[in-house]
Every structure is written in C-alpha cells, then in structure tokens.
Image: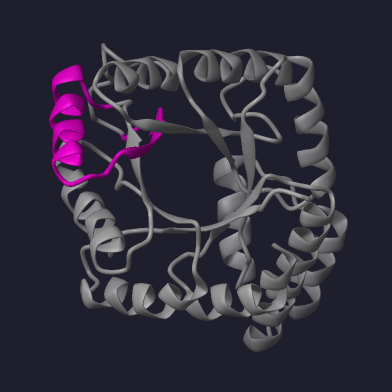
C-alpha cells in the first residue's frame, strides 16, 4: 500500500497596511481542506517581526487544530534572539520550525552566529525537542556557484538535523526530478515536499521568478502571453497549470505538495477540489 502523500499550505502574516482580520478569513476558508500542516512566513528584518508569525502559528494550532510550521530566518539574528523565539515557541507548543538563512535586508547587520541555515538547524536541535524543516532549491540557490555546491550545502543541513525539505517554487517538474536524482546521489534520504505556486497574474510571476531564480518554461511563457490582459482567464490558466504539475508529481510518488497560497483561499480551494482524491 502506498504511503500517504503530504498536502500543506504556506500563508503569510498581514502586511502593516492590512487588517489582521484578513488572515482570519483566509484560515476560516482553508480549514475545511484538512492540510497536514500550514507554514507561516516570517517578515523580513529582525526578531521584532516574529510576533505576528508566532501569534498566527498559535492560532493555526489552537483554533483550527492544524499543525503549524514556524518560519525562522537567521541572517540578521544572533543566538540570543533565536533562543528567545524558540523559548516562546516551546511555551506555546510550536515545535515545528522551518530553518532558513533568509534574505539580506539593506542596512541591517549580518548575523555573526549564523552564516548559513545549517548553523541554525544545529542550534535549534540543541535547544529542545524541535522537528526541523529546511528549504531546498530544485534549480539551485541564487547564491550557489553550482548545483554541486548547493547539494553539498543541503547535505550539511540534513546532517545537522533537518528532517523534511520544502522546495522553492518551480514551474517545470523536470527540474524537480533532476534535483531528486542529485539528492539520491548525495545520500540525502529525508522526505522532500514540492513547493507549487499557482500564478494569478503575469507581473506576479515575473517578479517572483526574478527574485528566486525560478525558470519559466516555454509552455508557461505562452500562457502568460496569451492571457496577460484577461485577469479571469489568467487565474484559471494558472490554476490549471498548477493542477497539471501536482497530478504529475503525485503520479511520480512525490513525498508531498506544499502550496504557496499567497493568502488566496479561492485558488487553494480550486486546486484542492481538483486533486484531493489523489492524495
């Protein structure tokens, strides 16, 4: 009998200009989809941004009875900052952490304690009974000089204690399958969940692609070109493309699907309704 494949969502705290009620609405609409977990992103910057992440992570577990994963980037934090956050996590039963290096914020001091995510993974494991998740990059991290270097760095994270990997978004499943082969060669044995982002508009996908280095295959470029001036058609085409990716991944026994929802519960529900019988 095949093992159950994981299905999960990523959400992010409301921006300063948004009401916190927006995230309540999103969670209300997602709760019936029964995800295995919901990950909650951490705003750029320092430890002051952790409050919203922890509050929403608590809400996910306490009100919606769904496991939450706390994003924790370390590039601008020291060991004391991280320990304070982890102690609060322990206090509220938040024992699942996604350990990230994070993005560099201009004019903020770089951490002297955590040069790499592998340093953070090791520190988290020393602080208590946490389950640590880590990020991986099917098309390699932007800062890596080569895929080989990136796989070596990923192995360090896994050896330091990361138990499950979540991929950066990608639009071509061939890149994911090739990446999985590299992981097998490097003896990286943990589960790898494929990160899928349904795209609602052309500007969004071009911005995200430029930030994370995700390649836009020709098939998707044609979709963007054909429907860029038809908002409804672009949403439907983006959903259809994501569903096609997910069906192919599930058919090829992916360990799990992690859906980057962009706090859009309508799109998440459409994808769930089209694929949930496959999990």
Provide the residue span drawn in magenta. 76-105
Res. 214 in view: yes
Q: Is residue 230 left or right of residue 94?
A: right
Can you say which quadrant of the picture contains the C terminus?
A: bottom right
- Residue drawn at 16 percent across, 49 percent down: 51
Is 95 magenta? The answer is: yes
The colour scheme used to paint the residues is one colour
What percent of the width, then of the height, locates residue 134? 49, 32
> Quick one: 119 or 34, which is closer to the camera?
34
Up/down of 224 relative to 236, above or below: above
* Residue 15 appears in the picture as rendered: no
Residue at the extreme front: 1
Give the residue drawn at x 86%, y 61%: 219
Q: Is residue 9 above or below residue 107?
A: below
Does 82 appear in magenta?
Answer: yes
- Name the image quarter holding residue 70: top left
Residue 264 shown left or right of residue 187 in the figure: left
164 to the left or right of 13: right
Residue at left 28%, top 20%?
110
Q: Is residue 262 above or below residue 161?
A: below
Q: Quadrant of residue 271?
A: bottom right
Is 217 left or right of 138, judged from the image as shown?
Answer: right
Q: Residue at x 51, y 73 (%)?
A: 33
> Where's residue 42, x and y in %?
31, 46
Q: Residue 263's x, y, as percent?
A: 43, 69
């Amino acid at each position: 009998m095949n093992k159950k494949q994981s299905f999960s969502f990523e959400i992010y705290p409301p921006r300063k200009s948004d009401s916190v009620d927006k995230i309540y609405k999103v969670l209300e609409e997602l709760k019936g989809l029964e995800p295995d977990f919901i990950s909650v992103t951490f705003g750029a910057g320092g430890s002051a941004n952790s409050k919203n992440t922890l509050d929403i992570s608590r809400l996910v577990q306490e009100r919606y009875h769904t496991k939450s994963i706390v994003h924790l980037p370390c590039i601008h934090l020291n060991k004391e900052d991280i320990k304070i956050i982890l102690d609060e996590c322990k206090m509220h039963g938040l024992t699942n952490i996604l350990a990230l290096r994070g993005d560099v914020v201009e004019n903020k001091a770089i951490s002297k304690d955590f040069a790499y995510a592998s340093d953070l993974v090791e520190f988290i494991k020393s602080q208590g009974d946490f389950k640590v998740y880590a990020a991986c990059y099917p098309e390699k991290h932007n800062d890596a000089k080569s895929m080989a270097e990136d796989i070596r760095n990923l192995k360090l994270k896994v050896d330091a204690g990361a138990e499950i990997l979540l991929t950066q978004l990608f639009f071509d499943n061939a890149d994911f399958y090739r990446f999985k082969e590299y992981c097998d060669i490097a003896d990286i044995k943990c589960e790898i969940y494929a990160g899928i982002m349904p795209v609602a508009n052309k500007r969004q996908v071009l911005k995200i692609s430029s930030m994370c280095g995700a390649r836009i295959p020709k098939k998707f470029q044609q979709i963007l070109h054909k429907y860029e001036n038809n908002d409804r058609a672009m949403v439907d085409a983006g959903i259809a493309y994501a569903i096609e990716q997910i069906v192919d991944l599930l058919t090829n026994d992916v360990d799990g699907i992690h859906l980057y929802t962009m706090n859009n519960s309508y799109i998440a529900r459409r994808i769930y309704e089209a694929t949930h019988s496959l999990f």
